Image (cartoon, rainbow, N blue to C red):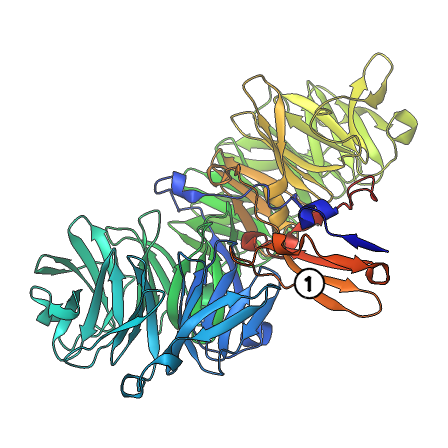
Amino acid sequence: MSFSFQNRVKQVGLYCLLSLIALLFTDNHLFGQENNSFKGLPFISNYGPETYKAGIQNWDIIQDDKGLIYVANNMGLLVFDGRAWTRYGLNNTKVRSAHFGKDGKIYVGSQADFGFITPDQRGQLLYTSLADSLPDEVRDFDETWKVYEIEDKIYFCTFKRIYVYDGNSIDIIQPDSRLEISFQVDNLLYTFQMESGLSVLKGTQFELVRNGDFFKEKRIANVLNYEKGSLLIATVEYGAFLYNNGSINPFQFKGDFWRNDYLINYSTRLRNGNIAIGTQNAGLFIVEKNGELVLHLDKESGLMDLTINYIYEDINGGLWLAMNNGVARVDLNSPFTFIDDRMGLSGSGYTALLQDDVVYLGTNNGLFKWENGKINFVGGTSGQVYTIQELNGKVLVGHHNGTFIVEGGKARKVFDENGAWTFKSPPGQPNLVIQGNYTGLFLFEWKNGSLEFKQKIKGFSESSRILEFDGDKLWIAHGYKGVFKLEFNENFTEVISSKRYDSRSGFPSDVLINVFKISNQLIFTADRGFYRFNETEDKFEPSVEYGDVLTKQTTMVDMESDELGNIYYIEQNKLGVLKLQANNKFENHSSSFNKIRSYWNDDLANVIVLDNHNILIGGKQGFIHYSPEKDIPRTVQPKILFKEIINSGKKDSLIFSGHENDKHPLEAIQDQKFKYSQNSFSFEFVSPHYESGREVLYQYKLENYDENWS
């Protein structure tokens, strides 16, 4: 007996569906410059030699049409698919440069060699040296530092010569003097010669550009388009210059962030117009076209190395850094950034408040003030902060050690009782403040602009972390006892009625019950969905609130709405936003939030809407900042690639090894037939969706065998 593959491996029955994470990710290029005053540091993925199993130094980075990343490394060419690294030795030479050709080949330059990589019929990459075919008299070069493609010809740039490959033969450009690094700008090839300056290739000869001798002995790091007719020329030791038909002027860095002793290794123009600069000794700088600093990353902000040899912007706007010690990816387009100890904030995030142009941040280590881009600790507030609220124009802080008021940037303790959870003013009584505490409720009053303690409210002594008024009645959710409804006397000094509602009152259990006020309406949640209070029956019953967008088993931990009616929420294992649509219905957006599942603080999990553009999520380390404008659904789903297909039985054989091109497509295996004794197959697949890291989830289904998706 025998059987064969169907039309394509897809029809064999393996369908891979990338779910949850990858369906939403961002494309920042749709937006202009944004206000970075309350943005954190971007996600940085560092890959050290112990991870990719090769040399420490990396020199070049490219991406192919499948999304795979290739890195020129001291021990060969590295390939990264988002999950695993593979190294190709390429004649055991140090690879210095790489280029993904229009013909689908990977062109590489290395020590005393250059050539290309293509897959064989089984999808395994094979290297073909072009330099080996050169005559001996022009084979004596040392390094191929750059590979470019201009008008369907490949230029292999060494310090002795430039070799031009047209797909069949190699022509040689022999300069009059030694070359340094060469640069491609549009369809022009520039080169730097220490003895003469900056030259451009005209035919088969290099000619000095007008006033190009200005750069004599000024080693050039890169040449870029700046604006029509102008080039931005970055030098290693002398900063950057604007060049326009012989006119040369220094490029001005605005502010005091740039120092003359910073050495530039590489620069590139990003798709949004910004300029990225990689240095030898100060990490990565991103500046606007006018020289203003957008972002500076160094070791203190998360990079594993300060020396950046090359910068590559991938198809999703992520920046890959080839470093002297490792590789990094900076996720510039993510809607999420980190606010943590790298910015001066210590501890786990619990609460925050925006007042005017100041953000107050509360962690288990105290209160912090974020103003003018700097985060500073507010003295005297060491310890657990539970809440930061603005009442009567003042900033109140609920703290394990008591109650504080913030005035003039300083915190003053106004009440010593431990365990201040939260504050609420009774409806129609703005001069009164009720504080929920470890041991019940406490009453405060505003006098002459200051908050003064009046008394402990009599008649209730349960821990009161979550409070919401419904008219003159106060609902208090308790972590494991249910929810309480309280009524007060006229001056709120005593609870005159208290009733507890729990599993005997319609809730599925006594635990995980919460109450939130959304759009001026009380929302009760439990460990299985939403509930509403039936006042006539004096009990709770299941509610269909948000039932069309959330499952019945939803267990809400926190909910908060913005001014636009969108509702941010945290479930026990999920974060998201219910976006209000034009028809007044909600759409649930949660896929992109899966990226931060492992980072958010699951102790008193919290989401804080500072304003419509700045959302904070309490993190295990500090906070996670979310920018709604940068969270744009993509219509094109990420690609899913077969990494390996193996046929097993009496003997194992490799059918496909991950790489295909027009000459050797995956369809080439469709007509293969196999004996019944070889009826076992294994499929390994991957999606190069780097911004999701290891949070990518898959589903699969074998047609004519599986009824449902995995």
Residue 305 horizontal/vertical position (percent):
45, 72
Residue 602 horizontal/vertical position (percent):
70, 49
Does residue 152 sit above or below 298 in this rendering? above
Residue 140 horizontal/vertical position (percent):
30, 87
Does residue 391 sit above or below 270 in this rendering? above
The residue at 22%/77% (across/down) is 179
Q: Nearer the viewer, residue 334 or 79?
A: 79
Does residue 176 sit above or below 508 in this rendering? below
Q: Nearer the viewer, residue 540 or 675?
A: 675
Q: Residue furthest top?
A: 536
The kind of residue tagged 1 is Ile
Does residue 257 sit above or below 76 in this rendering? above
Local packing at callout 1 (Cα closer than 10 Å; few below 14, some 14-19, many 20+) is some
The residue at 65%/26% (across/down) is 517
The residue at 16%/65% (across/down) is 203
Q: Nearer the viewer, residue 563 or 552?
A: 552
Q: Please state, as top left, top right, bottom left or bottom right, where the C terminus lies in the image.
A: top right
* Helix, strand or loop for disc 1: strand
Left or right: 30, with 253 as reference point: right
Residue 541 horizontal/vertical position (percent):
84, 21
Q: Please state, as top left, top right, bottom left or bottom right, where the N terminus lies in the image.
A: bottom right
Q: Residue furthest right?
A: 504
Left or right: 603, with 333 as reference point: right
Left or right: 35, with 579 as reference point: left
The residue at 66%/48% (across/down) is 8
Can residue 364 be seen by looking at this rendering?
A: no
The picture quadrant where one finds residue 210 is bottom left
Can residue 69 be seen by looking at this rendering?
A: yes
Left or right: 550, with 275 as reference point: right
- The residue that disc 1 covers is 655
**How many numbered circles are shown?**
1
